[in-house]
Image (cartoon, rainbow, N blue to C red):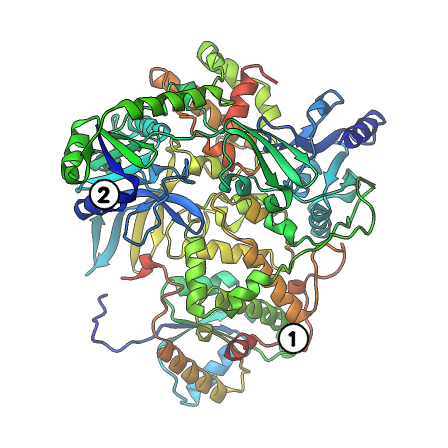
């Protein structure tokens, strides 16, 4: 266990950035989002949850897959370069770290997504315990411990110090890189902080949601539930929940005509959109109720059924605070579980 | 196509011309041997009010450095009132682009009748000179369309 | 609020309406959701407070396609949107029974949270103060500081269309309000470069979630051009350089002259982009060039962009004005 004074964090960031790209929460125009560290950037480690999750660092909202062009009458294809240098994502919360594991199950299983795999291979996750969890958080429901994030390096902000502990080989290597800035520390302060965090989490309003209905019911029983019809109506069919979600992994592939060539890119898609999974024959989900159901069934039933019971919701609560119509997965869980 | 750096800047200019007046005006400029720079690419539209704001933005996206719209003089629209609507739309759109920080000289509307070959050519010459002085469009560009 | 529920029950019972469109109590102190109530029993969850910011006129587009009449609660500014939708034939006046509800201003929970108040469990109002029970202790926050921007420049407390009023008096004054064009004027006074940087910073935050469009009562197209796969326009790409600007300019332009300035776009934006500044620029320009116009004040006038006069200003005004 090491520590570094809060006031010297910029030195730490500069030292990391000198070697590797460093992504961390940056405040721009009043909102905190993950971005590349520069000396001028306004680092914001106090905001508990960035608007967009750090998912962007591994699975960017838009990425070019290849470019093609007409060169002397022949078609020239220029594939995008895969990530080949290490980079650091600093300040991830325990829920966001778990979300990366959810994405791993999708993108690293056969057929492996090479773009994602390359980023995962080179990405180093530095997580930070949640000093003051908020009322929208419900990570505990999914067995995530916000006090003990399971990343390459775990950090805790206690008073005026940042405590640092490497948990994996990658984390050890990163620690070596910045060792001269860190000083040895004992674990007492961190242990106290952990207890405090866990005590707060116990008190959060959504910490004790009951998921048993999704474990014990048949898929079709949930699918055919009349409750979906009652719940979906306020949904405006925007994609806010999917785009702030750290685990939503659906994407669309499109071509962009640059005038002198074509760029094929992929970008996040949302199951809330009317053209989601549009095929030549049309669309299989024609009503908003079906699209709404798809999102929550995927998170709470389809995904766990295919991944040994791991839910593809991590309880970060971003959708809870961002939905324009105040709909969210918590309301769905409660309703399906029989609560009014 | 590679553009070498030492080459002189050649602006790309899109001119939307209505079929009934301005396009005929351009024709007249041509048949009267009145010169205007080849940087101007004319797109013929049935009426100036056919020009959707999106056309203008798309033109900038795909590399235009300036966009000019030409139509019949107010009162002379082939469809009676098309250019009156176009006038309001373009006023608001240009004002919005200005508000977003795009140089206001990059957009222009000019009324050119079928008899005004001279006006067409002088307008284009002026506009090209203006865009030349403003340089390349960078505030409303799409990086993906560069090279 | 009890009065609203009582009246809703009466109207359901006497068959004037078959459903009620209002707001349902959420599971936190500040997240009520728009909801349909079909029976007296369901109305027990009805709520109306400062967090009921959603403009229900948008939902009336769908409600008017349903069987039977709908009772809808509209705040004064929501009624402008409803009128505008009548004008555009998106809602049917006879399918709606409108109760105009009084409005003390709608609140933005983010303003409270940004002041460092976390872990909110419940909220109550005591005069001009919000009392917040949080897991970190009891907190207080001034009501007026939590108001959404749109409510600090309120258009007025007068309902433009209604069948009856509850909790609101006809011709009620809005109280002291700011100049809604203040920020637009500030931007206009900047240099083009500064303006460009301002908008580049704001618009590059856009995540293309379409919340602004989908919450907007003026965005009532059956199929949006940005959803159409037939053209190059359905670009979901999130690239800082162009697509966001394109989307927001076109959206603002399409609602120009129809936007009632209800402020839903800015309220719902997850990235806090001040989208109302785009709409207000158009409103300000329209007022200057074509005379004062407030969309939604009536149901039969011609909108500025579907109208013209022989003497309209020429587009060159933009350059001339810039040179002043």
**Which residue occupies 69% across, 73% down?**
C309
Residue for badge 2: A12
Q: Position of residue C41 (x, y in %)?
A: 73, 20
Q: Chain of mark 1?
A: C
Q: Position of residue B71 (x, y in %)?
A: 55, 76
In front: label 1 or label 2: 2
Does residue C251 show up? yes
Q: Do circles 1 and 2 both sit on a common chain?
A: no
Q: CA distance from mark 1 to mark 2?
A: 61 Å
**Which residue occupies 71% across, 50% down?**
C80
Which residue occupies the foreground of this view, C162 or C26?
C26
Q: Does residue A296 lie above or below B122 as drawn?
A: above
Q: Does residue A115 lie above or below A210 as drawn?
A: below
Q: Does residue B134 lie above or below A142 as drawn?
A: below
Count neighbours of disc 2 (C-alpha within 10 A) and say few if under 14, some if 14 to 19, many if 20 or more.
some
Residue for badge 1: C312
Which residue occupies the foreground of this view, A74 or C174?
C174
Does residue B51 show up? no
Where's the C terminus of chain A, which quadrant? Answer: top right
Q: Chain of mark 2?
A: A
| B18 left or right, relative to A49 | right
| C148 left or right, relative to C195 | right
Q: Position of residue A40 (x, y in %)?
A: 31, 54
**Which residue occupies 62% across, 34% down?**
C131
Q: Position of residue A244 (x, y in %)?
A: 43, 37
């Amino acid at each position: 266990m090491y520590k570094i004074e809060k006031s010297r964090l910029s030195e730490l960031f500069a030292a990391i950035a000198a070697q590797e790209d460093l992504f961390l929460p940056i405040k721009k125009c009043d909102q905190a989002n993950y971005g590349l560290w520069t000396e001028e950037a306004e680092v914001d480690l106090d905001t508990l949850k960035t608007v967009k999750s750090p998912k962007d660092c591994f699975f960017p909202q838009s990425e070019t897959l290849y470019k093609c062009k007409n060169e002397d009458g022949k078609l020239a294809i220029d594939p995008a370069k895969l990530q080949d240098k290490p980079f650091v994502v600093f300040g991830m919360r325990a829920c966001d770290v778990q979300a990366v594991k959810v994405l791993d199950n999708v993108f690293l299983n056969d057929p492996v997504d090479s773009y994602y795999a390359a980023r995962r291979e080179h990405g180093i996750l530095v997580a930070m315990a949640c000093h003051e969890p908020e009322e929208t958080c419900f990570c505990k429901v999914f067995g995530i411990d916000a006090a003990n994030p399971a990343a390459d390096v775990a950090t805790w902000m206690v008073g005026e110090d940042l405590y640092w502990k490497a948990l994996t080989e990658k984390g050890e290597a990163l620690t070596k890189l910045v060792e001269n800035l860190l000083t040895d520390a004992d674990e007492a302060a961190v242990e106290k902080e952990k207890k405090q965090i866990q005590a707060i989490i116990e008190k959060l309003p959504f910490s004790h949601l009951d998921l048993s209905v999704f474990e014990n019911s048949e898929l079709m029983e949930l699918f055919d539930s009349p409750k979906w019809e009652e719940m979906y109506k306020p949904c405006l069919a925007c994609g806010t929940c999917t785009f702030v979600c750290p685990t939503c992994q659906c994407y669309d592939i499109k071509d962009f005509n640059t005038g002198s060539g074509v760029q094929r890119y992929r970008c996040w898609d949302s199951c809330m959109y009317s053209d989601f999974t549009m095929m030549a024959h049309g669309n299989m989900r024609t009503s908003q109720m079906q699209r709404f159901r798809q999102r929550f069934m995927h998170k709470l039933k389809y995904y766990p059924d295919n991944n040994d019971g791991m839910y593809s919701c991590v309880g970060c609560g971003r959708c809870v605070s961002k939905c324009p119509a105040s709909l969210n997965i918590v309301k769905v869980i409660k309703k399906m579980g029989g609560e009014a | 196509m590679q553009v070498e750096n030492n080459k002189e800047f050649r602006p790309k200019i899109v001119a939307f011309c209505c079929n009934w007046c301005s396009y005929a005006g351009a024709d007249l400029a041509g048949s009267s041997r009145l010169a205007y720079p080849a940087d101007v690419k004319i797109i013929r539209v049935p009426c100036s009010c056919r020009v959707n704001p999106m056309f203008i933005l798309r033109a900038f996206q795909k590399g235009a450095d300036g966009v000019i719209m030409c139509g019949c003089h107010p009162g002379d629209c082939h469809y009676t009132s098309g250019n009156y609507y176009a006038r309001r739309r373009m006023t608001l759109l240009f004002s919005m682009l200005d508000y977003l920080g795009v140089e206001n000289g990059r957009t222009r509307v000019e009324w050119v009748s079928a008899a005004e070959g001279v006006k067409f050519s002088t307008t284009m010459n002026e506009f090209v000179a203006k865009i030349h002085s403003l340089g390349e469009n960078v505030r409303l560009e799409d990086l993906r369309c560069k090279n | 609020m009890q009065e609203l529920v009582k009246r809703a029950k009466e109207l359901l019972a006497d068959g004037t309406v078959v459903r009620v469109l209002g707001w349902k109590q959420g599971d936190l102190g500040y997240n009520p959701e728009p909801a349909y109530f079909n029976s007296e029993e369901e109305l027990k969850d009805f709520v109306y407070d400062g967090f009921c910011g959603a403009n229900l006129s948008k939902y009336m587009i769908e409600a008017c396609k349903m069987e039977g009449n709908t009772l809808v609660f509209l705040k004064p500014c929501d009624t402008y949107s409803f009128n505008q939708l009548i004008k555009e034939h998106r809602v049917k006046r006879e399918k709606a029974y409108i109760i105009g509800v009084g409005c003390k201003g709608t609140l933005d929970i983010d303003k409270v949270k940004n002041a460092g108040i976390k872990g909110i469990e419940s909220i109550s109002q005591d005069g001009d103060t919000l009392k917040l029970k949080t897991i970190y202790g009891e907190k207080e926050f001034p009501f007026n500081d939590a108001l959404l921007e749109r409510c600090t420049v309120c258009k007025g407390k007068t309902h433009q269309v209604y069948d009856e009023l509850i909790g609101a008096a006809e011709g009620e004054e809005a109280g002291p309000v700011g100049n809604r064009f203040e920020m637009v004027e500030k931007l206009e006074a900047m240099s083009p470069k500064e303006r460009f940087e301002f908008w580049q910073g704001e618009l590059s935050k856009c995540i293309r979630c379409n919340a602004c469009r989908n919450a907007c009562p003026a965005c009532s197209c059956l199929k949006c051009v940005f959803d159409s796969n037939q053209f190059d326009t359905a670009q979901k790409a999130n690239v800082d350089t162009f697509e966001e600007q394109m989307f927001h300019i076109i959206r603002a332009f399409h609602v120009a002259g129809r936007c009632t300035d209800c402020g839903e776009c800015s309220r719902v934006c997850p990235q806090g982009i001040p989208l109302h500044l785009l709409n207000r620029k158009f409103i300000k320009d329209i007022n200057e060039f074509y005379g004062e116009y407030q969309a939604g004040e009536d149901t039969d006038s011609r909108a500025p962009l579907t109208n013209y006069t022989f003497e309209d200003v020429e587009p060159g005004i933009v350059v001339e004005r810039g040179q002043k």
